Image: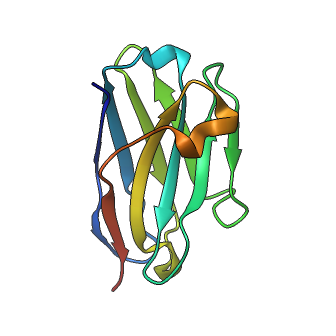
Amino acid sequence: QVQLVESGGGLVQPGGSPRLSCAASGISFSDNAMGWYRQAPGKQRELVAHITSGGLTHYADSVKGRFTISRDNAKNTVYLQMNSLKPEDTAVYYCVAARNIATLGFGSWGQGTQVTVSS
C-alpha cells in the first residue's frame, strides 16, 4: 500500500522559508518521479515542482527561483524548500508519486499539508 506523508506546513510569515517533507512507503521510491502540487481556496490544483527518478527538476513559473525540490532516495523522502514566501503561496500542498513523469497527476497522492502565509 502506497503511503505519502507530508509534513512541514503551518503558519509562516511573508518572506519565510519553510521546508516541506514527504516520506514515501510502499513504492520503489528511487524508480518514481515525485512532485508537489498545491491548491488554494477557490483555485484549481496546480503543479508546483517535480523531480524525475534521475533528478531532473521542473518548476512552475510562479515559484521558479524561490522553491527547490530535492529527493533523498536513501530516506525515501522528497523535499520542497520554499523561500521568500508570499501570501499567494497559501495553499494545501500535496506530494505525488508516479512511475512515469508524464502521468504524475494520476499517481499516488498524500493527504496534503496546509501552508498559510500571513503576518
Q: Which colour scheme appears in the figure?
A: rainbow
Identify the residue shown where x is 64% and y is 38%. 103
116 horizontally vs 68: left or right: left
Q: Is residue 41 above or below residue 68?
A: below
Identify the residue shown where x is 33% and y is 28%. 24
Identify the residue shown where x is 49% and y is 72%. 89
Q: Is residue 61 above or below residue 34?
A: below
23 horizontally vs 97: left or right: left
35 horizontally vs 64: left or right: left
Q: Position of residue 48 (x, y in %)?
A: 58, 55
Identify the residue shown where x is 41% and y is 58%. 93
Of the pair 118 and 56, the residue shown nearer to us: 56
Q: Quadrant of residue 52?
A: top right
Q: Position of residue 46 (x, y in %)?
A: 58, 62
Of the pair 18 and 10, the residue shown nearer to us: 10
Q: Quadrant of residue 116?
A: bottom left
Q: Position of residue 47 (x, y in %)?
A: 60, 55
Q: Where does the N terminus fall, quadrant-wise?
A: top left
Number of numbered discs visible in the structure rendering:
0
4 horizontally vs 41: left or right: left
Q: Is residue 51 above or below residue 39?
A: above
Q: Where does the C terminus fall, quadrant-wise?
A: bottom left
